């Protein structure tokens, strides 16, 4: 299993490159994000199976999230504890990044739109707002207010341009249209606890999932949001991040403060298909490799980044390639 140590830096976010299947970006912070600076690592899985550093760059505050450009293989945007976003060109990591600074508190989430019609960035902050950015402009295009507590995560729909979801410490999930920033298109109480993460199904534009500090993962159908369409149970502590598979409609993964990474199939069971415990601290970052079925990456506060292929995902991938006739 390829593993990389980020010395004296605690992992918050990992993302596979949408262009190069071996490339991974990892956002980290000193002192568990409570003080000190941050480091953005560009890593690569090499042919002998190792995970090596290609480049790294420093920021004066902790880095909490990272996302790749969908149009340029070298551009990465990060989110930091000083309320800013940084646009890095990792082909020249020694150059200072382009910065965007409007949030008044920590920026905890950043996401780059995946639809080719539009190329925008979302930032979600502890100042209770989400902002929309054009990477080519210095000021935000819109600010979305409506959450009453800090916004942990905002994610673009991979299907519908101008649509995104946000989740907050106020327990709500909100769905927005960027053309109508005054109020959300939909809003519901998703958990009786803080909601830390959300993600969209890659095969059904109406399905999304939320992960809460109650240890639950819930699925929602935009056509009827009166109650969840699935609920996954098994995490002992908060679900820090949830991600849908880009290869299977009903498969998703989660990482948790209980040190685990879990694989789920919401059509098969409310219990995890597999539980992986290879971290000794909170697990924060998680991503699927869209180029390689069955491969995921995670990172945690133990300063470790892992790239691995859980048995359950490999079995599902094999079943897709060799269906029963």
Image (tube, helix red, strand yellow):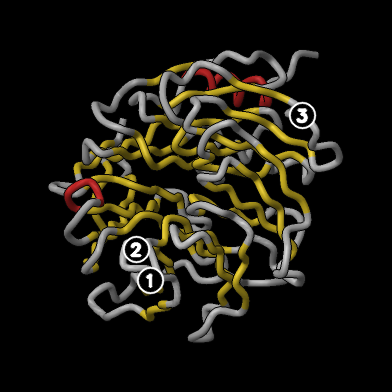
Q: Residue under label 1, please give it.
A: 84
Q: Residue at the location (69% across, 15% down)?
A: 268
Residue lying furthest right in this view? 223
Q: Mark 3 or 1 closer to N-term?
A: 1
Tag nearer the camera, 2 or 3: 3
The residue under label 2 is: 80
Residue at 38% x, 51% y: name it.
24
Percent position (x, y) of residue 248?
Answer: 67, 32
> What secondary structure is found at the residue carrying circle 1?
strand
- CB under 8 Å between discs 1 and 2: yes
Residue displayed at 53% across by 42% down:
197
Residue 166 coordinates in the image, percent (x, y): 61, 52
The residue that disc 3 covers is 227
In the image, residue 46 sits, relative to residue 125, either above or below, namely above
Q: Separation of disc 3 and disc 1 at Cα?
A: 36 Å
Q: State the separation of the CA atoms marked 1 and 2.
A: 6 Å
Disc 3 secondary structure class: loop
- Which structural element holds mark 2? strand
Q: Sequence order check: which comes first, mark 2 or mark 3?
A: 2
Q: Disc 2 versus disc 3: distance between alpha carbons?
A: 35 Å
In this view, the residue in front, 17 or 39, is 39
């Amino acid at each position: 299993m390829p593993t990389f140590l980020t010395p004296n830096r605690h992992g918050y976010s990992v993302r596979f490159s949408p262009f190069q299947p071996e490339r991974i970006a990892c956002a980290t912070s000193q002192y568990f994000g409570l003080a000190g600076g941050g480091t953005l690592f560009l890593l690569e899985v090499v042919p002998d199976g190792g995970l090596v550093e290609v480049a790294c760059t420093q920021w004066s505050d902790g880095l909490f999230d990272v996302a790749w450009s969908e149009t340029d293989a070298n551009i990465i945007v990060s989110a930091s504890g000083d309320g800013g976003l940084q646009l890095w060109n990792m082909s020249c990591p020694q150059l200072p990044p382009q910065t965007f600074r409007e949030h008044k508190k920590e920026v905890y989430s950043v996401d780059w739109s995946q639809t080719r019609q539009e190329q925008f960035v979302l930032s979600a902050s502890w100042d209770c707002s989400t902002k929309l950015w054009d990477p080519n402009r210095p000021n935000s295009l819109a600010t979305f207010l409506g959450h009453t507590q800090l916004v942990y995560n905002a994610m673009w729909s991979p299907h519908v341009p101008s649509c995104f979801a946000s989740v907050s410490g106020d327990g709500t999930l909100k769905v927005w249209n960027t053309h109508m920033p005054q109020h959300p298109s939909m809003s519901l109480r998703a958990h009786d606890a803080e909601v830390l993460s959300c993600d969209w199904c890659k095969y059904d534009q109406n399905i999304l999932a939320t992960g809460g500090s109650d240890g639950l993962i819930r699925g929602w159908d935009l056509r009827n949001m009166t109650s969840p369409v699935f609920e996954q149970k098994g995490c002992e502590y908060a679900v820090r991040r949830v991600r849908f598979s880009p290869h299977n409609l009903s498969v998703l993964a989660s990482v948790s403060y209980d040190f685990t990474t879990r694989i789920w199939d919401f059509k098969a069971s409310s219990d995890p298909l597999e539980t992986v415990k290879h971290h000794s601290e909170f697990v924060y970052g998680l991503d699927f490799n869209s180029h390689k079925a069955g491969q995921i990456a995670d990172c945690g506060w133990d300063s470790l980044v892992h790239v691995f292929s859980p048995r359950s995902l490999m079995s599902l991938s094999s079943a897709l390639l060799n269906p029963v006739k």
